[in-house]
Amino acid sequence: MSKTVENYHRIRALIPHHVMLLAVSKNHGVEKIQELYAEGQRDFGENKVQELLEKAEQLPKDIRWHLIGHLQRNKVRALLPVVSLIHSLDSERLFDELLKEAIRMDLQISVLVQVRIAAEETKFGMPAADVLPFIQSLFPKAKGRLKLKGLMGMGSFVTDSKQIHAEFSMLQQLFQRVKATPGYEDIQILSMGMSQDWPLAVELGSTCVRIGSDIFGMR
């Protein structure tokens, strides 16, 4: 058994069954993805559209590809036929581009709204205060072409567990407010937690953890 497969089964055994394990395969070759595929893993996350497309071309077609990195509008057209879930909807301009291309291609696209919960200025995502107005004003005009599945956020890359706890708690509370909004009661995905902080994220209500280095190793 390879180290990748060993790591995968160790982490899979620790994560509750109701929580999706998203294997973040960015910067790793198709051979490692194929190893996990053989173990039953189907959800893989990539940061860059081009890398996702290249891997999707080489790997089994029933893999569910997740775009977890920042999405540029000029990459939307190439991405939509392949992607299962976009985690990084964070602006009205991107919403409009996704909707335009979904209509043109006659597709239904699943998305998460990315919320900026971390202290670092480099993190993408919209401010928490803007999320509900954004959802309520834009999604009705999508008429089912863009399906809101939930929220995504990245905690600060720090060792201060109290800070991360506060950030994840804020996102979980926002998620509950969205679920309490008429028309959005069925959203299910709260995507928060990565290799360094996923146990805390699960404790605070995450339903999807994005784990890369703890499975694949550093690259």
Image: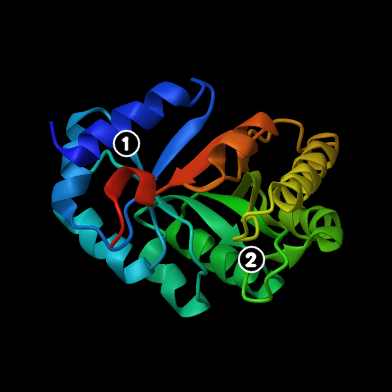
Using the image, determine if residue 84 lies above or below residue 70. Answer: above
Secondary element under disc 1, as helix, strand or loop, is loop
Could you tell me residue 200's position as x and y percent?
Answer: 63, 37
Q: Residue at x 42, y 74 (%)?
A: 75
Q: In front: 172, or 134? A: 172
Secondary element under disc 2, as helix, strand or loop, is helix
User: Dot 1, crowdedness within 10 Å: few (<14), some or many (≥20)?
Assistant: some
Using the image, determine if residue 50 lies above or below residue 152. Answer: below
Q: Given the image, on which type of amino acid does mark 1 rest?
A: Arg
Q: In front: 198, or 57? A: 198
Q: Residue at x 22, y 34 (%)?
A: 5
- Front label number (2 vs 1): 1
Cα separation, mark 2 vs mark 1, equals 27 Å
Name the quarter where the N terminus is drawn: top left
Q: Relative to residue 103, is residue 63 drawn left or right? A: left
Q: Which residue is mark 1?
A: 42
- Per the rendering, the mark at residue 62 is none
Q: Relative to residue 3, is residue 25 drawn left or right? A: right
Name the quarter where the C terminus is drawn: bottom left
Mark nearer the N terminus (2 vs 1): 1
Q: In front: 203, or 125? A: 203
Q: Which residue is mark 2?
A: 95
Could you tell me residue 217's position as x and y percent?
Answer: 29, 51
Color theme of the render: rainbow
- Can you see residue 44? no
Using the image, determine if residue 150 lies above or below residue 29. Answer: above
Q: Residue at x 63, y 39 (%)?
A: 201
Q: Relative to residue 38, is residue 9 drawn left or right? A: right
- Residue 26: quarter of image: bottom left
- Can you see residue 130? yes
Q: In front: 138, or 51? A: 51
Q: Given the image, on which type of amino acid does mark 2 rest?
A: Phe
